[in-house]
Amino acid sequence: MKESVVVCLDIGGSHIAAATLRAEGGQYYALRDARGDVDSGESRDHILTQWDVVIRQVWDEQHQHIAALLIAMPGPFDYVHGICLMDGMHKYQALLHMDVRSYLSDCYKIPGDAVQFVNDAEAFLWGELYHYKLQKKRMVGLTLGTGLGSALYAEGEVKDLNYGSAIFREGIAEDYISTRGMLAFLQHQGVRHLPHVKALLDAEDLESERVAAFGYLSDALLDFLRQYILPLQTDGIVFGGNIAKAHRLFLPTIEKELQLPCYVASFQEWNLFLGLASSYKQ
């Protein structure tokens, strides 16, 4: 008899992480996890193959039955029906209007109602609430990476804010507060050879450019937080995403200016998986 497992996926603009968990007595127990890169600007078949490679690293098809497939996914996305709505977002354009739920249901032989989608910022916030024990607080979670994710936790519920596509300055918030925004700023400064923010952090000869880029990020973040987050009357903000790993370069400025408690993500993927599992509606 096959073991029944829950498979959780964290899908971002440049990565996919997967894990299997076993449900027992109302609790979830970790089994296996894996991670891989995703070229979200590639063709549909290329993207889906990259997903499948990682999923099959954690799922033993011969000995395990998938009871539920829970996916943390960036937006815009129809989370109820499983339809990709990302258009002009510089990621997953090839999946636009695709019925991702039906595809995964058919591919892994799971009932459609057992394939559930959660906004990636919501899943992140669930995990960090669990980690920091903030369930009695009113909290906002922001993920800073290839895009800008945002979610609000209040009275036991997490909801997607979708502020990445909110009107901001001369475009949308994600145009400024993201890897793309920082690299665009650097290009205006004459630095054109960096593929991502990590390369900026690792470059020993770009100290002044690094300071300028994170100064740019701090200014944009402060404007965004004042415009969209402070009106929510939150008790604090949790910052995650790859850019938040360099929190020492911008978070002190944010805390000083806003006088609002700020938390740095645990960066423990299992917290996200456990948070995702806790949101599962059977």
Image: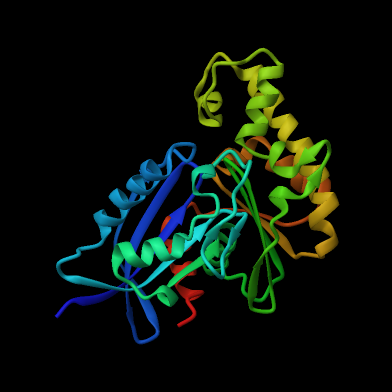
Quarter placement of the C terminus: bottom left
Q: Is residue 66 above or below residue 9?
A: below
Residue 37 spot, x, y in % from top left: 39, 41
Q: Quadrant of residue 25?
A: bottom left
In the displayed orientation, state which residue is furthest to the bottom.
Answer: 25
User: Observer-nearest residue: 271 or 101?
Assistant: 101
Question: Residue visible at 54% across and 65% down?
Answer: 118
Q: Is residue 139 left or right of residue 44?
A: right
The x and y percentages for residue 220 are: 77, 38
Q: Residue at x 75, y 43 (%)?
A: 172
Left or right: 75 as drawn, with respect to 213 = left
**Image location of residue 256, percent across then percent down:** 79, 45
Count of picture labels: 0
Residue 43 position, x and y percent, is 43, 39
* Res. 102 image quadrant: bottom left
Look at the image and tell me whether residue 63 can be seen.
yes
Depth check: 214 or 224 in front? 224
**How did the renderer colour the structure?**
rainbow
Q: Is residue 131 visible?
A: no
- Can you say which quadrant of the picture contains the N terminus? bottom left
Q: Residue at x 71, y 35 (%)?
A: 217
